[in-house]
Amino acid sequence: MGKAAGYDMETLGIILPLWTEAVAIYGPLGWRREKGSGFREAYPAPNLRVLAVCSGPGLRNAALAGERLCRMGAGGLLILGVCGAIHPALKAGDLILAERVLMIRRGRPWSVWEAAGSFGEYLQRRLFSGGMRVYKGTVLSMERGVGTPEEKRALYQETGALCVDM
C-alpha cells in the first residue's frame, strides 16, 4: 500500500458495490453522499486509513470507484461483496481472492483485469491460518445472474472461473 498525500500512514481503498453489502460490512451509520456514491473514511488502526465507497453494481462502477480511491491516496484496493459460486467445491461463506476478472464478450471469455504482485498470496495465507476457507482464482463478471446448475457447470468448464459477480 502507499502513503496518502498529506498523511503519514498507509491508505487502503475498499469498494462495496451494493448498499446491502456496505451495510453488512460497516453498518448503516457513518456514510455520507459524495459524488453520487456512499463514502466513508475510517482509521481502524494506528497508521492505517481506510476509504470505503459504495460504488453501485457493475464493472464500470467498480473501475470508477477504484480510480477515485487511488486519486485519494489508496495504495491498495479491495472489492468486497457477494458472488455466486460456479466451481463445484465452493460453499456459502467461502472467500474468493480474485487473481483475474473475465467478462463474456461476443460469446467468448475476455480478460479485463489481472492481479499484480504477491499480496494475494500473503492475504490468502493470513486468512487461511485464521480458519477461513480461501480460494484464489478467476472471477467472471456478468450483467445477469446464473440460475441453473447446467449453466453454472458450462460457465465453469468454459472459463475456469470460481464464481460469478454482477
Image (spheres, grey):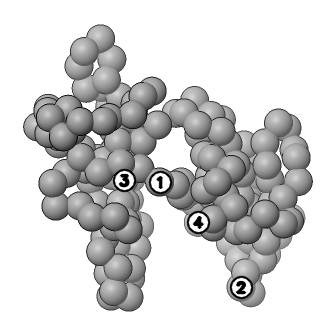
In this rendering, the answer to whether 2 lies above or below 17 is: below
Secondary structure under badge 1?
Answer: loop
How many other residues sit within 10 Å of disc 4, few (<14), some (14-19) or many (≥20)?
some
Q: Which is nearer the N-term, disc 4 or disc 1?
A: 4
Q: Nearer the viewer, mark 4 or mark 3?
A: 3
Query: Label 4 vs label 1: CA separation?
Result: 24 Å
Q: Nearer the viewer, mark 4 or mark 1?
A: 1
Q: How many marks?
A: 4
Q: Nearer the viewer, mark 2 or mark 4?
A: 2
Q: Is 23 in front, or is 4?
A: 23
How many other residues sit within 10 Å of disc 2, few (<14), some (14-19) or many (≥20)?
few
Q: Which is nearer the N-term, disc 4 or disc 3?
A: 4
Q: Is 73 in front, or is 164?
A: 164
Q: Nearer the viewer, mark 2 or mark 1?
A: 1
**Residue highlighted by disc 1:** 82
Taking the image as drawn, is residue 9 in sight?
A: no
Taking the image as drawn, is residue 149 in sight?
A: yes
**Residue highlighted by disc 4:** 1
- Type of amino acid at the residue the image marks with label 2: Ala
Is 93 left or right of 158, judged from the image as shown? right
- Type of amino acid at the residue the image marks with label 1: Val
Q: Residue at x 63, y 67 (%)?
A: 25
Residue 122 lies in what quarter of the image? Answer: bottom left
**Residue highlighted by disc 2:** 45
